[in-house]
Amino acid sequence: MPNLQPPGTAHLCTQLAATLLAQQRMLATAESCTGGLIAAACTDLAGSSEWFERGFVTYSNAAKSDMLGVDAQLIARHGAVSEIVARAMAQGALQQSLAQVSVAVTGVAGPSGGSADKPVGTVWFAWGLPGAVHSEMRRFNGDRAAVRAATVQHALQRLLTLLNTQT
């Protein structure tokens, strides 16, 4: 079966695995717009059970609330594609798992669903690490596949950077 991951993802996962193993940490993912692609990229690597704890695919708003404990009022007030929801997803992934590190993504992959405020390609990221949650928004160009691939790549790269700079 061919590898369907974005180019460079396997190398990022290898680096991430080495870093998490060295720090004796486990990773959990909370994904909306990527539908499990981050977890799939991680678990494509043999031996990932040593550092990958679990993945949550919370595509619907109800799943974000049910599986991750995201307050439905936050989603209603700010929208699923927002900083506060991404941060709540990252925190929920940590609370609902045995992991010490999490990554969460929520966005508009397209081709529809965008708005003036949140055009197609808008993605909110959050990374939960011991003692801190980091978040940022990115806008990616391209079709649905390109937005999702860029999201996976950025989520993993930024997590690796955060892990390597954390004191």
Image (spheres, helix red, strand yellow):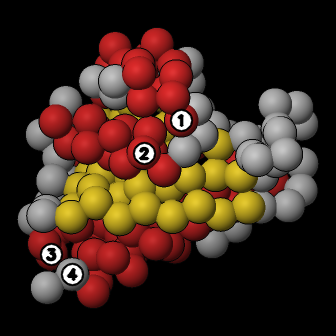
Identify the residue at image location x=38%, y=74%.
160
Of the numbered discs 2 and 4, the one sitting upstream in the chain is 2
Name the one closer to the observer, 146 or 73.
73
- Is residue 2 left or right of 17 when viewed as pictured? right
Look at the numbered discs 1 and 2 and tell me whether their residues touch, using CB distance below 8 Å: yes
Residue 68: horizontal and vertical position, in percent?
Answer: 31, 27
Q: Amino acid at mark 4?
A: Gln
Q: Report helix, strand or loop for mark 2.
A: helix
- Numbered circles on residues, count: 4
Identify the residue at image location x=34%, y=27%.
70
Q: Report helix, strand or loop for mark 4.
A: loop
Residue designated by label 1: 78
Distance between mark 4 and mark 1 Cα atoms: 30 Å
Q: Amino acid at mark 1?
A: His
Disc number placed over residue 84 in the picture, else none: 2
Name the one closer to the observer, 162 or 72.
72
Q: Amino acid at mark 2?
A: Ile
